[in-house]
Image (spheres, grey):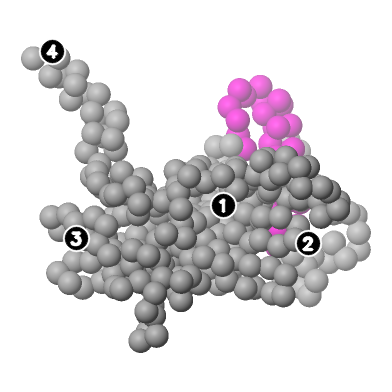
Amino acid sequence: MKYSYYLASLCLLISSHCYSQHYQIEDKYRGDPFFRKIDMNKLEKDCTYPLDYWQLDNTKQKEIDKLCPLNYLKFDFTSLHKFIYQGPRVIYNGQDFQLTLSMPLNEYDIAPETILGREISLSIINDNIVKDKIYLANNFMSIGELSVAYQRYYISQHGDIYTLYLGESDAGILPILWKHYQIDTQTMKFKLIQIDWGSVKITLPDNFTALPNPEQKVNYKDKEFKKCLKDETSEGCFDFKVYFYYLEQLKSKMELLTKKQKDKKNRFSLFKQKLDKKCLATPLPFDDDELHHYLNNLYSCEIKSFKEELSRVEKQLAH
């Protein structure tokens, strides 16, 4: 009985592993596990060519190419079209629903090579009805004369789905947007729980991290910036610049208050976590075009609370 008790306790501690549904999906549909966890900034650094790349000989170019893991993925994404160009393909068949891969087709699609640029979607099907669908992958799409874009993915055995949207040009490969979804078997929906733009990272329900661009120094004493502090919606003002200003001010003042009151708690971390949870109450949007609007609202929500808390902390320091 003791062993049963300890086993049950252990399962409660790691319930997401003990009770999560397993998705037995053939390797040819699963994608590449590299995309489970991405360091966007390191990936961009490793996959950006030096300025003289195209003047180097083939041997030196290959040495640089080896630094970019995107050049050496084990999964063959181009083969996906061969499996689904004649119609949707069920990749998981559970008791309550199925997962299918599909892409738009027309009467002229007679061979895989005619559809290499098509978007591949992943759908949740219940009782022959599409309950939800996400954009999963595609091959090269032109986004300019010298650039292409494409998306890659991975589906874990626990139903976590990871996607990475990429751009490629003569300057190298640029990771643009990483996403992490989970399958909600209760609502039959894909839940977007994480995004990573490189400089902006969001994890629901309570973590929003924005990183300043080290190459863009802001002069907080500049007249134009002071105008933005009075009204961040003014023309030429950017929410993220005002955000970093108040974040730095509040963090500094909270550290002073901690020293003054001889408190060992990290006041700012506790405050920020509660604030993030409040401002992230609205679910992340699926549509990439809506992400910028979502982010602007998120900045505004946090800036408002920064100002209020800064005023409160300054009053405490004054006494």
Label 3 vs label 4, nearer the camera: 3
- Give whichever of discs 2 and 1 has the lower sequence position: 1
Horizontal arrangement in the rendering, residue 24 relative to residue 149 (left or right): left
Dot label at residue 229? 2
Q: Residue extending furthest bottom? A: 107
Tags 3 and 4 touching, CB below 8 Å: no
Callout 2: 10 Å neighbours few (<14), some, many (20+)? some
| Residue toward you, 20 or 224 | 20
Residue 304 vertical placement versus 7 (above, below): below
Determine the CA span between mark 2 and mark 3: 51 Å
Determine the CA span between mark 1 and mark 4: 44 Å
Determine the CA span between mark 2 and mark 1: 27 Å
Determine the CA span between mark 2 and mark 4: 62 Å
The residue to which callout 4 is attached is 2
Where residue 127 appears, x then y in whole percent? Answer: 14, 69
User: Does the segment drawn in magenta span residue 197?
Assistant: no
Q: Residue extending furthest left? A: 1
Element carrying mark 1: strand
Tags 2 and 1 touching, CB below 8 Å: no
Dot label at residue 40? none
The residue to which callout 3 is attached is 97
Given the image, on which type of amino acid does mark 3 rest?
Phe
Label 2 vs label 3, nearer the camera: 3
Given the image, on which type of amino acid does mark 1 rest?
Asp
At x 66% / y 55%, what residue is drawn?
A: 173
- Give whichever of discs 3 and 4 has the lower sequence position: 4
